[in-house]
Image: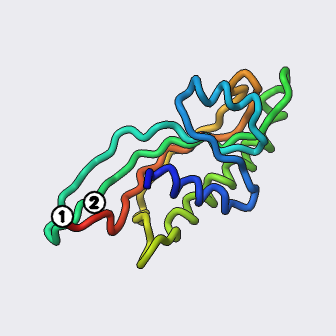
Amino acid sequence: MPIRNQIEAITRSLSAQPTFVYGTANELNLQADDASFPVVFMYPLQPIEVSPQVNGSVDNTFSIYLEFLYKTEFDQFTADNEAYVNQALTMANEFIVKASKYREGEGRYFRVKAGDKAKCMPVYNKFDVNSTGVNLTITLQTMYFGSF
């Protein structure tokens, strides 16, 4: 099952009940026109680190880039969009907490280590539809990925 399915499951459990859309920047720009906001956009994974382990399993570490966005009006000043940025940041924070607790099968699916840093930046007037929020870059390591 693609990793995006687990990310989508986590985003659908967020309090703000955002829509989830996956694709390249061009695809997301097109799909934003018809998306229901708030929305979480997920870009393709890059890079994927593969680490063989002593016990015969393989750990995969994914660099995930997401945008948590709200629809905004054209010609709004940055100060007018601060409330959207704060709401999107709350959504991103909730995503990190829920990703660390997300379960599939016998245990947690992702390992999110205390002290690991995720990068989050405000984005304004994103896409043709005009949206504002935050982008989040986070590294997630899968647990129990596979034993051979």
Does 75 appear above or below 79? Answer: above
Say left or right for 127 vs 140.
right
Quadrant in the picture for residue 10: bottom right
Judge by depth and name the residue closer to the eye, 72 or 122.
Answer: 72
| Residue 36 picture location, percent across and down | 78, 41
Using the numbered discs, state the Cα–Cα distance from disc 1 to disc 2 in whole angstroms: 7 Å
Judge by depth and name the residue closer to the eye, 78 or 140.
Answer: 140
- Considering only order in the chain, which callout, 2 or 1, is on the residue closer to the N terminus? 1
- The kind of residue tagged 1 is Gln
| Disc ID at residue 22 | none
The residue at which mark 2 appears reads as 59
Q: Pointer 1 and pointer 2: residues touching (CB < 8 Å)? A: yes
Colour scheme used in the picture?
Answer: rainbow
The residue at which mark 1 appears reads as 53
Task: Give me the residue at 32% from left, 63% from top.
Answer: 145
Instruction: Tell me the SS state at disc 2.
Output: strand
| Residue 103 picture location, percent across and down | 49, 72
- The kind of residue tagged 2 is Asp
Say left or right for 145 vs 147.
right
Say left or right for 18 vs 66.
right
| Residue 90 picture location, percent across and down | 69, 55
Task: Give me the residue at 35% from left, 66% from top.
Answer: 143
Task: Give me the residue at 46% from left, 45% from top.
Answer: 64
Instruction: Tell me the SS state at disc 1.
Output: loop
| Residue 56 picture location, percent across and down | 16, 67
> How would you rate the neighbour count of disc 1 (Cα within 10 Å): few for under 14, some for 14-19, many for 20 or more?
few
Considering the image in quadrants, where does the C terminus appear?
bottom left
> How would you rate the neighbour count of disc 2 (Cα within 10 Å): few for under 14, some for 14-19, many for 20 or more?
some
Does 104 appear above or below 38? Answer: below
Considering the image in quadrants, where does the N terminus appear?
bottom left
